[in-house]
Amino acid sequence: MTDGTQTGEVLTRTQQFESICKILEEFEYREEKLIPILQRIQDVYHYLPKEIIEFVANSIKIPASRIYGVATFYSHFTLEPKGKHLIRCCNGTACHVKQSIPIINAIRKKLNMQEGKNTSDDLLFSIEIVSCLGACGLAPVVVIDGEVHGQMSPAKVEALLDKILKKEAGNE
Amino acid sequence: MSDGIITINGKQIPINGERSILELAKKAGIDIPTFCNHADLSVYGACRLCLVDIDGRIVTSCTTKPQDGMKVLTNTDEIRKLRKVALELILADHNKSCPTCDKNNTCELQKLTRVIGVENVRFKPTRKPRPIDNSSDSLTRDPSKCVLCGNCVRACNEVQGIGVLDFAKRGSNAYVTPCLDKPLSEVDCVLCGRCAAVCPTGAILPKNEIEKVMAALNDPTKKTVVHMAPAVRVSLGEAFGEEPGEVLTNKIAACLRMLGFDLVFDTSFSADLTIVEEATEFVNRVIKGEKLPQFTSCCPAWVRYVELFYPDLKDNLSSCRSPMQMFGGVIKDALPGELGVDKKDIFNVAIMPCTAKKHEAALERFTHDGIRDTDVVLTTQELAQMIEGAGINFKKVAPDKFDKPFGDFSGGGVIFGVTGGVTEAALRFAVEKLTGEKLQNSDFVEVRGQEGIRTAQYTVAGKTIRLALVSGLANAKKVCDEIRAGKCNYDLIEVMACPGGCINGAGQIRNTDFDYRQKRSAGIYNNDKSMELRNSQDNPDIKACYEKFLGEIGGEKAHHLLHTYYHSQPTSTSSVDIFNTGKKEGKVSVKVSLAGRTKEETNLLSEVLNFIDSEKLQDKVYVEGTFFLPKWEEGVNAEVNGITLSKADINAVKDAIKKAI
């Protein structure tokens, strides 16, 4: 990805808008490219803001309701704001057997996210429980900002989060 | 020419180009149960109720083309069992409050439950309740009654080309909704009601306003006036077992009187008035060669469509009000003096085949000093309900006449109810006007028909008049795009939002026959043919109305009461507002046009944003991109605090922002 849309990077609102325009141009404003367009936009914002849904609808001249339909059909898309750092915890069969639940609970406790809440109030972290990441040999697996961490334990994952929190505190 | 023979339940039936076995069977008098099959819509195959047995295979009859030699069984024990289960599953998640539903007795789901014979529903509902949407002037949406057949979604997309409704989510969580779950009043709905017209259940219904009318009828201080639209006369009878197309004008007049209305009129009278004004306007535009093509303006869904989606073409609309609003203007102006009552005590009710009319009547431009020209619009369906509710036995009602001073109407007024009718009535007037000779033949059959886009051409007094007759807004979109591209040379374009015109309006009695539209249309034309008075301009009450109340045709008073103006308005999604922090109030407002959808526009917007960022003006300036900027077509591309900038570059915008701060 060359338009500065990698997870974790923070763009200004202006840069975000410029990225969206670039994405639309790249896909030539074509209706049949809607899904890749939405995927790339989600990379920019980490979610699909409703204003952007309407902007895309107007730009490629299709009804906004259709984009809403597509965006709510695929679980890959989200209309809720996501945190800067995305934590994906595997709870597939192998990871589950290897005690993934205590890991998930530890993350939730550490980041103060109750059950049912998937983004921290400071918008720093989002958690996603997924059903298999295809790395069962490394179970239990946690992926943070695209980086795979195998054979996790509550203590190990807490250490990883501490590292990110420390870095973020330094940024302030 | 037959395409072969098919056997349905042992009966041999010739194939004549039918789309599906379902359609063929229906024509042959065998009804196969279905929700999602509709003559106006694409084939979908969602509801799984139209299953049939073809040579031992079970298939959906709506998606299967009839082929020579097929042996079809529609009612075997196996099929009956399959249908029963499918229907039982649909019913499990349906809000079964049937007796209190407006669709009671006209509901397809109710009917199919009866004919298929589901005795009980063994499954529990799983669907999450969603709120009723009562926000629009015309329609009520109750998602708890939706069976997900998708008819409304296809009607809005395919017939009207708008796409207000679509499915959201999937599987057992799927539901039908406008974008972002917004209410109908906050999206670009034109209120045409095609969704309600094709909905098999009570999930989308015309808004019921009977109680408002009952209150007025029971209020001794109110003088109640009612008029009914041309299309109502060929549909209302269907609610009482009559055939579609049966002309019941005077019977309906009698019913309206029995309901207690003080004065009973026919909207065909004001349709005649519309012709006199609109055709005069057309003749003037042709002579001057300006604002052509002229668009008709009687269909409120079409008018709203132009205002929303083709604001640059709004001057092409005839400035004439619709017949309903002309009548409203005249009734509220002329009747107080005639009857010796206060204007505020006149209660004007219009019986319309249409849901968009409810919205039209509520528009600010038709309210003067807090008094609406049309107080309430009732659909044909609501009138049928009122007649039944009052215990009137429709079959036994003796015909009655309409009241003076607006009691006469011509065939020209009556044909307003069908696509091509407004144009034909206008031709009857315009040809006489342009040639200066009495019209010999009132029939202009070339403009008639059911196709969604038709064209015709007449040479009158050496002038060629090119006409387009359009029904369905998806078709209107094609024509509007041609005009924008400069590829269109029509002089008059008639548009009705509903396929076939008002006879097929969303307020009409719901009919699922394959030929009801043709029958209603034929009814209107037969009615016209049988009338002594064919041409609007010959209507004696029209002449008297001008003499007594209106003055000259197109004159000042006529203009005030019979004409209107249009607003181009932004669509619900036209503003892109994601760049700002904090509130808009107290900041310099900057709008950058995106209406042309060009790279230059998005570049200008990001240059403005970069300028705001680098100068740290976020607390002082509020930036929006907009797909709707008035006078965009004249070169306006930005606006700073309400001041428009034409063909502005970044420096011009910067200067304007600096000045404004």
Image: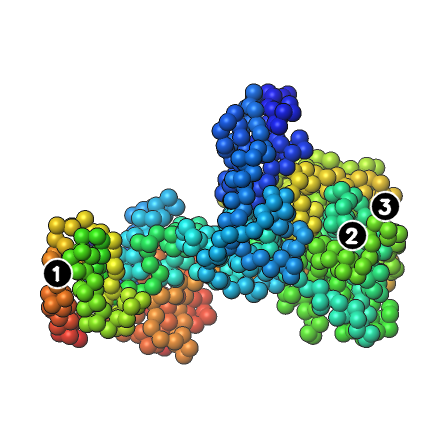
Question: Could you tell which of marks 2 and 3 lies nearer the N-terminus?
Answer: 2
- Front residue of A108 and B594: A108
Badge 3 crowding class, 10 Å Cα cut-off, few under 14, some 14 to 19, many 20 or more, is some
Q: Mark 1 near mark 3, Cβ–Cβ under 8 Å?
A: no
What amino acid type is highlighted by mark number 1? Met
Q: Which residue is mark 3?
A: B533
B559 horizontally vs A29: left or right: right
Q: Are marks 1 and 3 on the same chain?
A: no
Rendered location of residue A148, percent (x, y)? 14, 56
Q: CA distance from mark 2 to mark 3?
A: 12 Å
What is the quadrant of residue B565 in the picture? bottom right
Front in this rendered view, residue B613 or A132: A132
Q: Amino acid at mark 2?
A: Ser
Q: Which residue is mark 1?
A: A152
Q: Quadrant of the C terminus of chain B?
A: bottom left
Q: Nearer the viewer, residue B464 or B393?
A: B393
| Chain letter behind tag 2 | B
Q: Is residue B40 visible?
A: no
> Circle 2 is placed at which residue position?
B268
Helix, strand or loop at mark 1? loop
Say left or right for A104 vs B346.
left
How far is the residue under mark 1 from the one under mark 3? Answer: 90 Å
The amino acid type of the residue labelled 3 equals Leu
- Judge if badges 2 and 3 mark residues of a common chain: yes
Question: Which chain is disc 1 placed on?
Answer: A
Which x, y percent locates residue B477?
54, 46
A14 to the left or right of B382: left
